[in-house]
Image: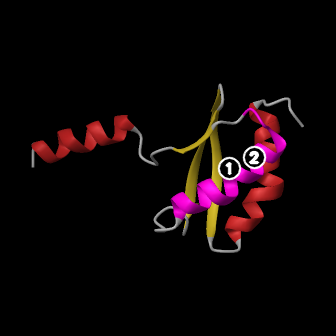
Amino acid sequence: MNNMTFDSVKEIIDIKIKPLVQEHGGGIELKNVQGGTVYIKLLGACRNCPSAQLTVQNHIKRILVQHFPGIEKVAVTDSISSDLIDMAKKLLSHA
């Protein structure tokens, strides 16, 4: 499968990767596909796991590249939006 669209990458994540991370109490969500980069969000136990980067590079990226050879990078996105961080800073500065 070489046609790399958001939906095609999401399908592989849902079928091949999500069950693997769920076995360890985690989750994964596809956020974006841009050029050769796939942006994901790790959820549950995977979110704060010390081995998360190894899992991303050794398992998640490997599986995705098998299906989409054009993938160059899998990036984990921050789980907190910059708008929420700015709002929290404003609230805390007035406390």
Q: Residue at x 64, y 74 (%)?
A: 24
Q: Are marks 1 and 2 in contact (CB under 8 Å)?
A: yes
Kindly indicate the quadrant of the structure image that contains residue 93.
Answer: top left
Q: Residue at x 76, y 52 (%)?
A: 63
Number of marks present in the image shown: 2
Amino acid at pointer 2? Leu
Q: Under tag 2, what secondary structure?
A: helix
Q: Quadrant of the N terminus?
A: top right
Q: Is residue 37 above or below residue 53?
A: above
User: Which residue in the protein does label 1 denote?
Assistant: 61
Q: Nearer the viewer, residue 93 or 8?
A: 8
Position of residue 65 measured from the top left corner of the image (x, y, whole percent): 75, 44
Kindly indicate the quadrant of the structure image that contains residue 43.
Answer: bottom right
Amino acid at pointer 1? Lys
Position of residue 38 measured from the top left corner of the image (x, y, whole percent): 64, 38
- The segment highlighted magenta reads 52-70
User: Which residue in the protein does label 2 denote?
Assistant: 64
Position of residue 52 measured from the top left corner of the image (x, y, whole percent): 53, 62
Q: Under tag 1, what secondary structure?
A: helix
Residue 59 in magenta stretch: yes
Q: Is residue 48 above or below residue 91?
A: below
> Residue 90's mark?
none
Q: Residue at x 68, y 49 (%)?
A: 61
Q: Real-space Cα distance between discs 1 and 2?
A: 5 Å
Position of residue 10 measured from the top left corner of the image (x, y, whole percent): 76, 43
Q: Nearer the viewer, residue 63 or 21?
A: 63
